[in-house]
Amino acid sequence: HGLRNMAAPLRFGAAVMQSAVTRGLFTSRLFSSVSTATTPLGDLTKQEPSKEAPSSLVKDESAKDRILLEPLKHPDFFEVKNLFTMRDLFNAKVHIGHKEGCWDRNMYPYIFGARLGVHIIDLDKTVDHLQHALNFTAHMAYRKAIILFISRHRQFTHLIENTAKDCGEYAHTRYWQGGMFTNATIQYGEGIRLPELIIFIHTLNNVFEPHVAIRDAAKMNIPTVGIVDTSCNPNLITYPVPGNDDSPDAVELYCRLFKEAILKGKAKREEMEKLVAKEREEKTKKDS
């Protein structure tokens, strides 16, 4: 009992320290020009902040404020509502859930009804939740956050890894080692950086249990986006998206939408930085 009582505060202290390190390093990528590629999570956590000298644009506080705050003034700054329609979701079989006897009661608000013993997901709610999830993802990409795709379904491993690679982010589709978030400072050393957003294409692992990373992300206050089928628990997901997570057509649709949202966010960031830099240059010439 004495050893357990001593270990508890040590674990809590490590979690608090990691949370502080994550918050401190969050801004390191906001104005960094270093792009990322798909790498193992161990390499991700060892990534060092950019050592490049800050540009004059970074030093200008008004320019930083404008770049970061401008997207918040618009409800759909990245136009993610134009990425898909309800017909696209229907054709991809997003509305088809699991059998009536295999469901999580927390999914009740998202179920439209049942047909031939199979639950049908309410696509009106799926459209609304998916738009919010894509909008949040685009905002995080715009702020140069580290985004991590997670899935444990082997048949979609290559698809999800290629999706992350195409948009310059990270993916983890293998066995999840416990404590990779909550015990990161002990496993990987001090000064590590955790992802700022996690996208769960599947929220269950290959033995139909909730993925451990969902619980760990909630403990570390890392926002999450997750596809939740009728057999999943959406309570710990920041942005749950009710939908079928077994159909290949549906999974391909999710990957395409999240990739386009991330690329839109990054493209808008480059556009805003060039626009602000051009205006500052013109202003400097005018003043001189």
Image (tube, grey):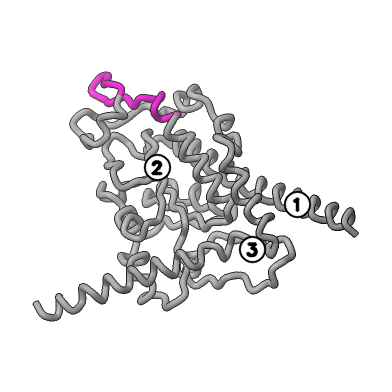
Front residue (pair 185, 56): 56
Q: Which residues are magenta?
A: 112-127
Q: Which residue has dot 1 on it?
A: 274
- Callout 3: SS: loop
The residue depicted at 33 percent of the width and 68 percent of the height is 15
Q: Which residue is mark 3?
A: 32
Alpha carbon distance from label 2 to label 1: 31 Å
Q: Specify the quadrant that holds the N terminus.
A: bottom left
Foreground disc of the pair 2, 1: 1
**Residue 125 x, y percent position in the rendering:** 39, 27
Is residue 273 rendered to the left or right of residue 258? right
Element under disc 2: strand
Where is residue 180? Give x, y as percent.
36, 66
Q: Badge 2: how crowded within 10 Å, few (<14), some, or many (20+)?
A: many
Q: CA distance from mark 3 to mark 2?
A: 27 Å
Dot placed on the residue nearer the N-terminal end, 3 or 2: 3
What kind of residue is marked 1?
Lys
220 vs 190: above or below: above
Q: In the displayed orientation, state which residue is furthest to the left.
A: 1
Sequence-wise, the earlier of marks 2 and 1 is: 2
- Circle 1/circle 3 CB separation < 8 Å: no
Q: Is residue 16 left or right of residue 275?
A: left
Question: Considering the image in quadrants, where does the C terminus appear?
Answer: bottom right
- Is residue 166 visible to us here? no
Are the residues flagged by discs 3 and 2 in contact, CB closer than 8 Å? no
Q: Amino acid at mark 2?
A: Tyr
Query: Is 128 in front, or is 114?
Result: 128
Q: Is residue 38 left or right of residue 234?
A: right
Q: Residues within 10 Å of mark 1 (few under 14, many from 20)?
A: few
Name the residue beneath numbered marker 2.
239
